[in-house]
Image: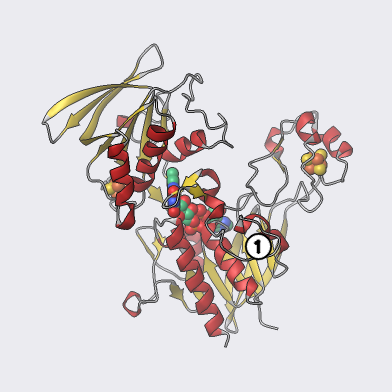
Amino acid sequence: MADPVLIIGAGVAGMTAAVELADSGVDVILVDRLSTIGGNALDLYKAFPTDDCFYCFEGNRDRPGIRKCFYRSAMIDQPNISLYVNSEVGEITPKNGLFQVKLDVGPVYVNPKKCTLCGLCLTHSKAFTFTSPQCQPQSVKYDPSKSDEGDKKAESECPTRAINLDAQPTEETITVSDIVLATGYHEMKPVNMDEYGYGKIPNVITQLELAQILDPNGPSRGKLVRPSDGASVESVLMVQCVGSRDENHYPFCSKICCVFAIKHANIIALERTSAKVSVVYMDIRTYDRHEKYYRDARDAGVEFVRGRVTRIESGDDGKLDIIVYDSLLDKYLKFNVDLFVLSSALEPPPGIHTLSKSLGLSLSSGYFTPADRASGNEVVIGKHIYACGGALGPAEVPESVTQARAVASKILQSRK
Ligand SMILES: Cc1cc2nc3c(=O)[nH]c(=O)nc-3n(C[C@H](O)[C@H](O)[C@H](O)COP(=O)(O)OP(=O)(O)OC[C@H]3O[C@@H](n4cnc5c(N)ncnc54)[C@H](O)[C@@H]3O)c2cc1C
Ligand code: SF4
Ligand code: SF4
């Protein structure tokens, strides 16, 4: 029997590659360092270009037992996928045309196959949480750093005996034929950019944090409120290219932040109609079909200002005074807003250098790069090594899914 394929990263790209391969009879080992799969998409509320729930992207798939939602049970029910969450890839050694890989597997405190989500443990201890109704595996999570006196009671009273507080990390060595890098990206936290006050001035947030506020499953249940005091938001200022196209941070354009900023501006302007939204930009890059979002936003009354933010101060009432230089009008404008939202650079995730080194790969702008770009094989990174989605650089979901399918098809072809 052929050796399994290792997929590192269980975001949209990794999950798609896993399901495509598994459905074709290939054994897959899918590893993610987080306790929940889904990657960034888990926190993003509506998705451009269709404004669907992120998990309904693949709603047309005819998979028995799955209504609209492609990923919800595919990861758990597909017998060819072995899922390792809370786990990291260690040393990788090429051996006889295969790869020997060490896996650091995190402790399994709550067995997802036994947890029925009855919620009893949540009433006993704050160390247990339920991330989101969309999370997979569908179970509560336990965080030992928040351990309190209710832990043991939760463990002993769990009706299905799903909790094991003595669980330990383990190490496994696996042999795989191919490696798929689906490690995605991170939204940069602009803590070192004093001009924006992030982390210092209240109510300065990133787009990813705004997505969580807008999400009906998020902390405010979808109500547009100020994080500092829960007051209703009446005005929002967004600023583009924070840390992107900037020689001091990331010289590249993060490609998708204009589109998702305008998506959020539209949600606010069209669904929360009392709030006013303005966007400060250098250039608006709504590539391809996404130009429609830009048109819709202008029609919905979103204000676009070409220029730069020059000063920000917080007032006593929790509002922010922000001075913007308008380069088209050649004058300074003053905004008084509840929320200041930064479209921050999308950067490679931590650990990507170690991973690339252990595979003998080079990186371009911090991301994996095709072995032979001229050949058009965008997803082939090395011999039996592939990459898809955000691992290749900032990418939208449809692009990530297409690349993941290309990876699956390359691997299947190589096995013929
Ligand atoms: C604010 C915002 C809004 C967006 N809105 C949209 C939208 O409306 N429509 C759209 O199409 N796209 C949108 N995107 C882009 C979308 O999030 C990405 O296209 C998508 O998440 C890419 O999926 P991925 O699987 O490549 O990467 P990710 O979602 O980043 O997943 C990567 C996974 O790999 C794991 N990982 C990383 N390194 C390791 C390692 N060494 N070991 C183990 N695990 C690892 C991570 O924990 C993560 O789970 C948005 C992005 C942002 C920031
Ligand atoms: S008590 Fe047990 S079954 Fe119920 S939610 Fe907690 S871990 Fe799951
Ligand atoms: S996509 Fe837009 S906001 Fe993002 S870096 Fe490029 S120009 Fe700036």
Q: How is the image coloured?
A: secondary structure
Residue behind mark 1: 103
Lateral position of residue 62 relative to residue 343, left or right:
right
Q: Is residue 185 visible?
A: no
Q: Is residue 305 above or below residue 166?
A: above
Residue at screen point 46% across, 67% down? 402
Residue at screen point 57% across, 35% down? 218
The amino acid type found where label 1 is placed reads Leu
Query: Residue 170 falls in which quadrant of the image?
Result: bottom right
Q: Is residue 48 above or below residue 61?
A: above
Q: Is residue 121 visible?
A: yes
Lateral position of residue 4 relative to residue 339, left or right:
right
Q: Looking at this view, is 214 or 206 the one in front?
A: 214
The N terminus appears in which quarter of the rendering? bottom right
Q: Residues within 10 Å of mark 1 (few under 14, many from 20)?
A: some
Residue at screen point 67% across, 71% down? 174
The C terminus appears in which quarter of the rendering? bottom right
Mark 1 CB within 8 Å of ligand 1: no
Q: Residue furthest top?
A: 316
Q: Looking at this view, is 149 or 322 the one in front?
A: 322
Query: Residue 41: x percent and y percent?
Result: 52, 50
Query: Residue 202: x percent and y percent?
Result: 43, 23
